[in-house]
């Protein structure tokens, strides 16, 4: 449909985001025998293009003889208006085909506030937004990504959901859909293909389950048919070495976020930060072999022409053998044009800064650390076991090595948080500025405050989120406390957006009509601060007789049925509950990659293990927690017993 | 040595911005492993000098950029092979067509180019109506336009910047919207006239369809030439277009 689009693109902002043509873009050949996937990111091209999950599946599907895959992103309001005025549908970027040419519209869901964009894109695709209203000629609407560990708020709009790693499961899904396509997609066949899909481990078909409520409480989510699993398990790729993707990372022509080569060095994290959903649901740790990382970096730089490569993971400095890997990469890029290597998350200690110093030869402007909480007590609660000395040594090393600005990430609204913890953030920031003065005239420390949202499959999933007023009070407390401190700047996220994120994070199916109403009233791009509108959400909740406070601020009890209880990330619910009790008792839990197994379930449940690239644990222990690892080898074998959590004394 | 490259920008890629294409060039030059000179300092940048910006959405048959190489003229860099080496490293629709060594003392492209030729599709118009409108425009002694600059209203005259204007016929069958086609040569110095300004100066104003820059011209000491030095393949077909 390029001829229809072409005259429109001259009328919209940043038209380059709709043309495709990236280096690495596939040239898909559609044919009636192939299952056609339209992979979608429900936000703008600039945000969505770098998404590695989508790019990995894009390549894997196009390598298959029985599938083709193209990409699409949310059109900005100006183009949407022009499309709707001319009755033109959502289109693919690679060959500019209408969405109706595809069999599956598969979304990557990484942020809850994009849900209304998902509805908008389904609608633009010419498909009824409610799954129940779709007919055999309509494509299947699917979703994967971290948000799908609680897909219940959008269950009404999705035909199927994928839990966990997508690399292997897309093949199985393609086969089932291919058979459906070959059968002619006759009347009533939609129900049949969904039933078939529900038999694949890792696929959740919401319409095959029924929710039962007693009063305001959900009491059960049960399969409607005996052949549909009572609990859907996530999929885990046992070894990342089998999937050196993306092989041809897309190089966008126009500017996007994270515009650089990305090489995933490991997936999963066992650090055990209790607020972190990503760390919990992606276990176990699967490190990519160092040799493969080196090859992917070298080949990627050569192919793309990028001058920056990021080694990505949830905590890259914890990659075993990180020092030699970094040394090798620096050495290999020594000749030729300058290349900067970045780690998206830096470890809070001098070791982390040492690596950064080795990597970032030029452009030493700012370094970012994430201590997450202001006091040792609070950090024990969240299990981010960074000592003040670690932070100070990191900040001192950063200034000593020529960095001028330090950014510190903190969460506010954490369980058991007191004003002392909030003020502790100010104290840390002030001390960091003082340290900086030893090295530079006007050091700057930026404190970035994010409102904490409890997420499913974390030990904090039972915690009642702070109210907007309470978050605002804490932010103001810190602002007042640091107002006179030259060099300390406080930035914060809008607590109102945190509020709605909290609603989606732990909501249930009753939120479906609310999301639909917000979308129908124009509430798209809610993750964009200029578009976010709390009143829309409040009104929609009230219109459907639902209580925002009940969903967001209420503490859950141990016996409460949670909306995601019929799904599984491998973690035992009793492990999470025990970890929640430990949190309240201010008891830390060290990284299980280097210590005995706690049997959280992520390995044992699926008969898989951590895979490490080197038998050498990183210096100073995981995340610089000071764990003594000198005597331990790599404990990849599993223990049957469940050891007692280790207290702070053992950690120190 | 300094080399000057000429390239086309046609098709879907026309919707990219000048900055987008500048970044694509930097990546392409790195991938071609050309010995591009860098600036000194803390964050070295490749010494690449771009010509006049082309508006997002416009096509071009004649875009230019200058690149400084660390190797002297006559070195191992095979200039003749450069177009074929670079084009596949650039987005589809960007094709390098010619290259030549230029003297470092030459003015930069931004300083040197004095006018550009354009082909402009005007949807909804006919060659006859457009000819009449163009004649009326050319007959005007003054075409004042008011622009806002730093909060102040500034008035200036477009007429001296419209060097040539004619109607070349109806739009080709592949045009997204049917109409008539203007050909214009517009000054870039001392005051640059953009195609959109030209269309707005018509009475009534014309809407802009596809726009394609066909040539860039350097007029100095009474002679007019294209930015690539003699010897490089000429873009202008014999006997056509050259003013």
Image: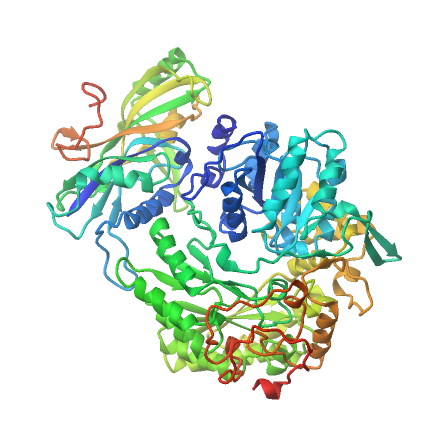
- Mark count: 0
Say if residue B203 shows up in the picture.
Answer: no
The x and y percentages for residue A427 are 55, 81
- The residue shown at (37%, 49%) is A304
The x and y percentages for residue A316 are 48, 67
- The residue shown at (56%, 51%) is A167
Asked if residue B231 is positioned above or below residue B127 in the image, the reply reads below
The quarter of the rendered structure image containing the C terminus of chain A is bottom right
The x and y percentages for residue A195 are 74, 43
**Which residue is situated farthest in the right direction here?**
A215
The x and y percentages for residue A277 are 63, 64
Q: Which one is in front, A77 or A3?
A: A3
* Displayed quadrant of residue B12: top left
- The residue shown at (30%, 61%) is B43
In this picture the colour scheme is: rainbow
In the picture, measured across the screen, residue A517 lies left or right of residue A17, that is: right
Say if residue A544 shows up in the picture.
Answer: yes
* Displayed quadrant of residue B198: top left
Q: Which one is in front, A75 or A572?
A: A572
* Displayed quadrant of residue A158: top right
**Which residue is situated farthest in the top direction here?**
B128
In the picture, measured across the screen, residue B235 lies left or right of residue A253, that is: left
In the picture, measured across the screen, residue B87 lies left or right of residue A455, that is: left
Q: Which one is in front, B120 or A206?
A: A206
């Amino acid at each position: 449909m390029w001829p229809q689009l072409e005259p429109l693109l001259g009328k919209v902002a940043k038209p380059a985001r709709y043309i495709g043509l990236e280096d690495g873009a596939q040239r898909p050949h559609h044919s009636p025998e192939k299952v056609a996937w339209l992979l979608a990111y429900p936000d703008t091209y600039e945000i969505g293009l770098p998404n590695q999950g989508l790019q990995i599946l894009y390549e894997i599907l196009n390598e298959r003889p029985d599938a083709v895959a193209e990409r699409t992103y949310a059109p900005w309001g100006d183009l949407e208006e022009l499309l709707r005025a001319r009755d033109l549908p959502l289109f693919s970027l690679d060959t500019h085909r209408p969405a109706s040419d595809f069999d599956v519209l598969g979304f990557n869901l990484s942020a809850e506030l994009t849900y209304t964009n998902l509805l908008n894109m389904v609608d633009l695709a010419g498909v009824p937004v409610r799954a129940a209203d779709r007919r055999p000629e309509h494509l299947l609407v699917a979703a994967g990504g971290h948000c799908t560990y609680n897909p219940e708020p959008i269950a009404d709009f999705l035909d199927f959901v994928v839990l966990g790693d997508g690399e292997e499961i897309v093949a199985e899904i393609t086969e089932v859909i291919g058979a459906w396509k070959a059968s002619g997609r006759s009347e009533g066949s939609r129900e049949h293909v969904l039933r078939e899909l529900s038999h694949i481990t890792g696929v959740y078909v919401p319409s095959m389950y029924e929710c039962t409520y007693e009063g305001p409480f959900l009491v059960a989510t049960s399969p409607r048919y005996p052949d549909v699993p009572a609990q859907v398990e996530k999929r885990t790729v046992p070894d990342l070495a089998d999937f050196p993707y993306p092989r041809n990372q897309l190089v966008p022509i126009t500017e996007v976020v994270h515009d650089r080569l990305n090489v995933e060095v490991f997936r999963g994290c066992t650090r055990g930060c209790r607020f972190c959903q990503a760390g919990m649901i992606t276990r176990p740790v699967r490190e990519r072999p160092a040799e493969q990382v080196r090859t992917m970096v070298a080949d990627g730089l050569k192919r793309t022409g990028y001058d920056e490569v990021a080694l990505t993971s949830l905590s890259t400095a914890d990659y075993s053998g990180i020092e030699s890997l970094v040394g090798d990469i620096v050495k290999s890029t020594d000749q030729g044009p300058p290349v900067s290597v970045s780690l998206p998350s830096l470890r809070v200690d001098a070791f982390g800064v040492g690596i950064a110093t080795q990597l970032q030869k030029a452009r030493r402007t700012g370094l970012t650390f994430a201590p997450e909480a202001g006091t040792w007590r609070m950090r024990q609660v969240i299990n981010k076991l960074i000592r003040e000395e670690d932070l100070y040594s990191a900040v001192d090393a950063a200034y000593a090595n020529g960095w001028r600005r330090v950014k510190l990430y903190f969460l506010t609204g954490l369980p058991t948080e007191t004003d002392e913890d909030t003020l502790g953030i100010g104290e840390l920031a002030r001390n960091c500025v003082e340290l900086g003065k030893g090295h530079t005239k006007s050091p700057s420390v930026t404190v970035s405050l994010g409102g904490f949202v409890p997420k499913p499959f974390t030990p904090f999933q039972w915690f009642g989120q702070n109210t907007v007023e309470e978050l605002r009070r804490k932010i103001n407390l810190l602002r007042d406390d640091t107002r006179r401190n030259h060099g300390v700047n406080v930035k914060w996220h809008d607590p109102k957006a945190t509020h709605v994120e909290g609603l989606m994070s732990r909501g249930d199916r009753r939120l479906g009509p609310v999301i639909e109403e917000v979308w129908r009233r124009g509430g798209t791009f809610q993750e964009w601060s200029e578009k976010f509108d709390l009143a829309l959400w409040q009104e929609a909740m009230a219109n459907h007789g639902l209580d925002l406070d009940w969903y967001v601020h209420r503490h859950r009890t141990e016996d409460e049925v949670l909306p995601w209880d019929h799904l599984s990330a491998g973690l035992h619910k009793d492990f999470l509950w025990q970890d929640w009790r430990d949190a309240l008792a201010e008891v830390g839990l060290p990284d299980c990659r280097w210590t005995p197994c706690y049997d959280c379930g992520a390995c044992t449940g699926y008969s898989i293990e951590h895979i490490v690239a080197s038998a050498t644990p990183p210096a100073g222990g995981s995340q610089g927690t000071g764990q003594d690892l000198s005597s331990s080898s790599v404990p990849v074998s599993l223990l049957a017993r469940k050891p007692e959590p280790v207290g702070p004394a053992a950690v120190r | 040595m300094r080399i000057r490259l000429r390239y086309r920008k046609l098709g879907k890629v026309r919707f990219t911005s000048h900055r987008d294409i500048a970044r694509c060039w930097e990546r392409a030059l790195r991938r071609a492993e050309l010995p591009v000179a860098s600036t000194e300092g803390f964050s070295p940048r490749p010494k690449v000098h771009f010509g006049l910006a082309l508006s997002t959405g416009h096509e071009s048959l004649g875009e230019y950029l200058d690149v400084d190489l660390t190797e002297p003229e006559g070195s191992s860099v095979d200039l003749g092979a450069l177009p074929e080496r670079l084009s596949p490293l650039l987005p589809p629709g960007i094709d390098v067509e010619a290259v030549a060594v230029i003297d470092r003392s030459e003015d930069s492209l931004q300083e040197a180019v004095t006018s550009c030729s354009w082909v402009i599709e005007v949807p909804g118009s006919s060659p006859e109506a457009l000819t009449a409108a163009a004649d009326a425009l050319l007959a005007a002694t003054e075409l004042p336009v008011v622009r806002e600059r730093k909060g102040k209203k500034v008035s200036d005259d477009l007429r001296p910047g419209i060097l040539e204007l004619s109607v070349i016929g109806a739009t080709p069958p592949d045009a997204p919207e049917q109409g008539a086609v203007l050909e214009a040569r517009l000054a870039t110095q001392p005051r640059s006239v953009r195609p959109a300004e030209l269309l707005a100066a018509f009475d009534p104003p014309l809407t802009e369809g596809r726009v394609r820059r066909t040539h860039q011209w350097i007029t100095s000491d009474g002679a007019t030439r294209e930015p690539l030095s003699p010897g490089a393949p000429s873009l202008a077909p014999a006997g056509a277009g050259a003013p």
